[in-house]
Amino acid sequence: MKHIPRTLRVTTGIFLLVFGAPSHSLSQTTQAQQQSMTPQVVLDDLMEGNQRFINGTLTLQEVNVVASREATASGQYPKAVILSCLDSRVPVEVVFDQNIGDIFVGRVAGNVENEDQLGSMEFATRVAGAKLVMVLGHSHCGAIKGACDDVKLGNLTLLLEKIKPAVKAVEGFKTSERTSSNAEFVARVVEENVRQTVTDIRQQSEILKELESDGKIMIVGAVYDLESGEVALLDK
Ligand SMILES: [Zn+2]
């Protein structure tokens, strides 16, 4: 502490007293923290957690899992709900360095919304108080590649149909280039699929749309890079 000016120490102390400890502390998000955080603060918190993940400096490594589990058993105050792909290489809590009880995660191959996911998001925000809805796509997504190649396989066929509008919407490629073997095309479809899912969420859920227009939540799209570990936010 000796290099930190006293005024700054006092200011920091007051800040912690008023707003509670930063949410990336080793304990899980409390009710007071959830209520005091704005949607932008939650987004910043997640992006800071992602930076720690990229750097390999996770606070999760120091978490007392047993204590966190016991502390959250009687209640939860998650700050965000994230719709992610099923992919095993996108461990959402780890990617954002979040503890037990910090975030809701809905997962389905290709991170597309449906009424079950929408209902879950409405619960997460309106009922449970989460401030941020994020749709998280990722590079080299198998579901996106399957949709690009028009794969047919059991129930997967119907799931991939939900990604097809994103495949069709991507322009600037010749027919022969519109396959899973074209990494650039796949990357463009991954982004487009996230954008369309965000748009669909606003169109299909009056509750989420209203919460967003009232400034109570934010709805954002992002893409995770399997190689770098970086989550890149998409423009609105
Ligand atoms: Zn995927």
Image: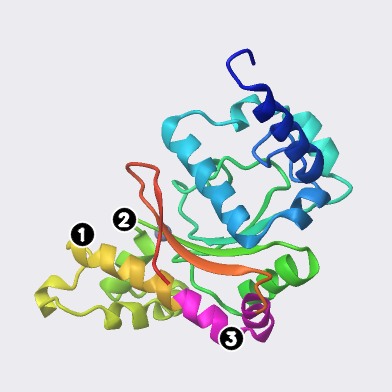
The quadrant the C terminus occupies is: bottom left
Specify whether 176 is left or right of 13. left
**Colour convention of the picture:** rainbow
SS under mark 1: helix
The quadrant the N terminus occupies is: top right
Marks 2 and 3 sit apart, C-alpha to C-alpha, by 28 Å
> Height in image: 127 above or below 105?
below
Q: Residues within 10 Å of mark 1 (few under 14, many from 20)?
A: some
Task: Evaluate if marks 1 and 2 touch, with contact meaning CB atoms under 8 Å apart.
Answer: yes
Tell me the residue that label 2 is attached to. Answer: 140
Residue 190 vs residue 5, the one in the foreground: 5
The answer to whether any part of residue 153 appears in the image is: no
Magenta segment's dominant SS is helix
Q: Which residues are magenta?
A: 197-213
Residue drawn at (78%, 63%), measured in percent from left and top? 128
**Is the CB atom of the residue marked by disc 1 within 8 angstroms of ligand 1's nearest atom?**
no
Specify whether 190 is left or right of 156. left
Tell me the residue that label 3 is attached to. Answer: 204
Marks 1 and 2 sit apart, C-alpha to C-alpha, by 8 Å
Residue 21 vs residue 234, the one in the foreground: 21
